[in-house]
Image (cartoon, grey):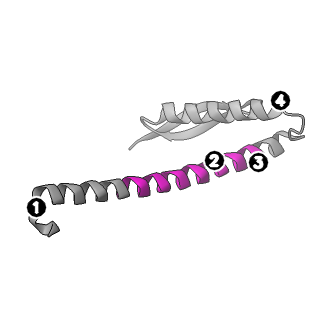
């Protein structure tokens, strides 16, 4: 996959980022999410004093959100697997009723 440079704005800084072809939209969305979170955090009374502090705090919050999302996904997979196993056993009993005796 070829790469080219995409210019994004993050924390009022213009950055040129190498990006695989076809992933430009995702990169721009990520930059937009970062800026929205920085703006939201700046409105709080206890916001960071420097842009670097704000970026570190926002990065920690994003990492925490990712960890929570992964845990939620794992729990959902377990619930789905349990449902699948129940459906499989129900179908098996319906197809082969003689196995219940």
The label nearer to you, 4 versus 1, is: 1
Say if 97 sits above or below 60 in the image: below
- Label 2, on which residue? 65
Q: Is residue 78 magenta?
A: yes
Can I make out residue 6 in this image?
no
Q: Main secondary structure of the magenta part?
A: helix
- The picture places residue 91, in percent across and down from the top left corner, at 18, 55
As measured in the structure, the alpha-carbon distance from the residue carrying label 2 to the one carrying label 1 is 46 Å
**How far apart in space, not on screen, are marks 4 and 2 (Cα)?**
20 Å
Give the structural element (helix, strand or loop) at label 3: helix
Quadrant in which residue 48 is drawn: top right
Image disc number at residue 96: 1
The quadrant in which the N terminus is found is top left
Q: Quadrant of residue 12?
A: top right
Q: Is residue 96 left or right of residue 42?
A: left
Describe the element under mark 2 as helix, strand or loop: helix
Q: Give whichever of discs 3 and 4 has the lower sequence position.
A: 4
Task: Determine which residue is flagged by label 4.
Answer: 43
The tag on residue 56 is: 3
Q: Which mark is first along the chain, 2 or 4?
A: 4
User: Is residue 67 among the parts visible in the rendering?
Assistant: yes
């Amino acid at each position: 996959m070829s790469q080219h440079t995409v210019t994004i704005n993050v924390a009022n800084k213009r950055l040129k980022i190498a990006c695989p072809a076809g992933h430009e939209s995702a990169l721009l969305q990520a930059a937009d999410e970062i800026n929205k979170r920085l703006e939201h955090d700046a409105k709080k009374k206890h916001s960071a004093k420097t842009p670097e502090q704000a970026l570190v705090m926002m990065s920690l919050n994003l990492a925490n959100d990712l960890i929570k999302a992964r845990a939620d996904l794992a729990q959902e997979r377990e619930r789905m697997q349990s449902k699948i196993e129940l459906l499989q056993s129900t179908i098996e009993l319906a197809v082969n009723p003689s196995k219940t005796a």
